[in-house]
Amino acid sequence: MSAKSNGKVVVIPSAHTVAGERITDGLQANEYRLALGATPAHFQTLDARIDGRENAYCQPVDLDRPESVNTFFQIAFSQVGQPDIIALEALPINGRRLQPERTVEIATRRLLHCLDAALPYLGETLHFLFIAPAYGPAAIPIATAFLGAQAAANGKTSIPKVRMSVVSPPPAYPCDDAAFARTIVHLIEEPQYPDVTEALLSTKRKSRPRGTRSDVNARTRIDA
């Protein structure tokens, strides 16, 4: 088994896309345990594609329906174990061209559906990889507030530490590009990687932004 994977469980709710397929292939080579999702319309194709692969399980999921996302994570947990990494692709959305505000709304809602559904099955840490448009980092404070509210509602003093990596490819660098998929695989395998915005979401301390910014790299650590 790959020293980098260490048997980690990676959940890819949109594994039916071109980028999702390439990311899945890159991780499969390193023997991660994979929980893969696809829209009902694409599920059979994905299921046939991974047929015979070890350490991979797939099921249909509608990311716009919370009950479907809840079922997806419940079954994924029973099949492959506790999630270590969730890679959620928010681009494209059903191939439609939408206004940026609408795209952010849909992508953020799907992000929150996944966070909410995954919480009961998490360990102490989670790496949430959010593949989103250039305005995707706007979801970070929303996710921070959501996790804090969930902890308060459930009477918890703390929640799992969530490292959020937002990867936003420029328009000239499509997310179905093979090099882009390799970037995602490297980000999953390495503790840090350039050209991403990152945050560590926690409820242990008051929000305090930290980090440095350069022309090619922006990282933010948020402890809420």
Image (cartoon, rainbow, N blue to C red):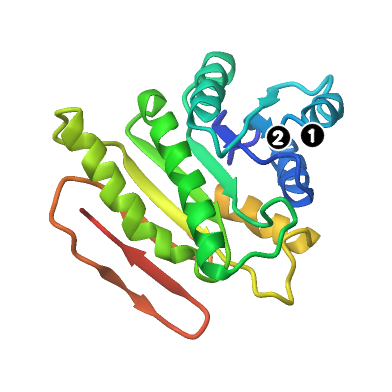
Q: Secondary structure at mark 2?
A: loop
- The residue furthest bottom is 215
| Number of other residues with Cα within 10 Å of mark 2, as a class: few under 14, some 14 to 19, many 20 or more | some
User: Residue at 74% across / 21% down in the picture?
Assistant: 54
Between residue 117 and residue 24, name the one nearer to us.
117
Whether residue 11 sits left or right of residue 15 in the image: it is: left
Between residue 196 and residue 20, name the one nearer to us.
20
Q: x, y percentage for residue 129?
A: 52, 50
Q: Secondary structure at mark 1?
A: loop
Give above or below for 64 relative to 218: above
Give above or below for 133 relative to 213: above
Would you say the residues marked 2 and 1 are in contact, meaning their CB atoms lie under 8 Å apart? yes
Q: Which mark is residue 42?
A: 1
Q: x, y percentage for residue 175?
A: 72, 61
The amino acid pointed to by label 1 is His
Q: Is residue 158 visible?
A: no
User: Residue at 78% across / 32% down in the picture?
Assistant: 41
Whether residue 57 sits left or right of residue 64 in the image: it is: right
Quadrant position of the N terminus in the picture: top right
Q: Which mark is residue 6?
A: none
The amino acid pointed to by label 2 is Thr
Q: Is residue 111 visible?
A: yes
Between residue 50 and residue 118, name the one nearer to us.
118
User: Residue at 73% across / 72% down in the picture?
Assistant: 173
Q: Residue tagged by mark 2? A: 39
| Number of other residues with Cα within 10 Å of mark 1, as a class: few under 14, some 14 to 19, many 20 or more | some
User: Residue at 70% across / 39% down in the picture?
Assistant: 15
C-alpha gap between disc 2 and disc 1: 5 Å
- The residue furthest top is 78
